[in-house]
Amino acid sequence: MVFLQPVVIALALFSFLSEALPALQPRDADFASLRGLTTVSRDRSGKKGDPVDKYFHESTFHPHYDGRFAQRVVSYDTRRTHLTHLMQTYLKTMHGIRAETWIMHGSLLGWWWNRKIMPWDSDVDVQISEQSMTFLADFYNMTVHHYDLPGVKGGRNYLLEVNPHYKNGSTDDRLNVIDARWIDTETGLFIDITTLRRNETAEALGLKGHMMCKDKHHYLHKDIFPLRDSVFESMPVKIPFAYSQLLEEEYGPRALTRTEFEHHHFDTKKMEWVLMDTNEKNLIIDERPFRGAKPHRLGPGGSGGGGTSINLRDPDTEVMHVPGSALEIS
């Protein structure tokens, strides 16, 4: 039995852990300001080619890596391990500071199948309440969280970075739909954090209970809340109340039954997505197309191709009690 033990370090230049709470400034933490935290010698972010108003700059070689911390795409097995640790440390941290967050999109689909990140995914998607997003911005922006992880010599550092444009809830701000990121400083892999907000446009029309994110996903309050308790990557997690309905709306009904996708087959005995050809590990297996495309193309419910299906009943949500100290990872 091993434990995740966090140590939080505030970056002196950007820390918001002070008596006064200064307003976030619309500037990014550039490569030079992260020296000592990043291990790479060259900035491979897309900053130079991005519009000036864009805050987060994905790498020049892949949209799911932060080029300030990465020089290349990591291998299939390495990515899976790092994403697992990325998710575990994020959930542990958010629980510790009492921030309200839950998994969504492809991560929720992975939860549906076997409570794990799908092996072809290269990022993780979560949502957070508006109140908790403000809390992160005021007290935890640009904090580094060190975790001692099983089998990882010296542990690993994770950076929580808040986009100062999070205060702008308009969908017109298309360059800044991601409100914050939880970043693995060793590989550049990250978790996208988006804020769930009241839909003020709908409210002005007299429509109650309508919610939205800046990435143009729309929900009803009753579909998200009350959040359910479950487990994801061996950690306690929150999931939206109407999870199966939300998944079908985003990915199509077949996403919940199709057992072949992205060179993988779902083994119902092992309850695992298994590569059909191990040589496929050399491919960059990933979600595609990326953000902005039709949502149902991103998961196993896509309309293209053949594939086989099975019928599964809705998985019961599971409750894991969180002990008072560190969370156990078996």
Image (cartoon, grey):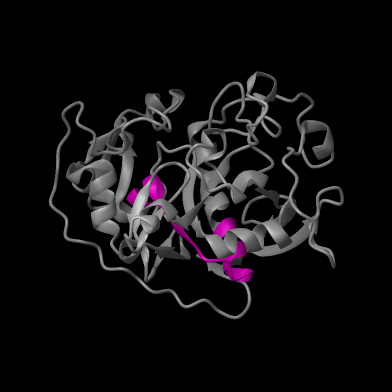
Q: Residue lying at the far top in this picture: please name it.
A: 49
Q: Name the residue located 26 percent from the left edge and 43 percent from the top edge.
A: 266
x and y, in percent, of residue 45 in the image: 67, 26
- Range of residues picked out in magenta: 89-111
Locate residue 231 relative to residue 77 in the image: left or right.
Answer: left
Asked if one can make out residue 233 in the rendered structure from this viewpoint, the answer is no
Q: Residue lying at the far front in this picture: please name it.
A: 205
Measured along the vertical axis of the image, is residue 300 above or below residue 85? above
Tell which of 202 and 265 is nearer to you: 202
* The N terminus, quarter of image: bottom right
Magenta stretch contains residue 94? yes
Tell which of 56 and 24 is nearer to you: 24
Locate residue 288 relative to residue 250 in the image: left or right.
Answer: right
Locate residue 309: give its quadrant: top left
Locate residue 324: give its quadrant: bottom right
Q: Name the residue located 52 percent from the left edge and 66 percent from the top edge.
A: 100
**How many marks overall?**
0
x and y, in percent, of residue 72 in the image: 62, 25
x and y, in percent, of residue 248 in the image: 23, 48
Locate residue 69 relative to residue 150 in the image: left or right.
Answer: right
x and y, in percent, of residue 172 in the image: 50, 37
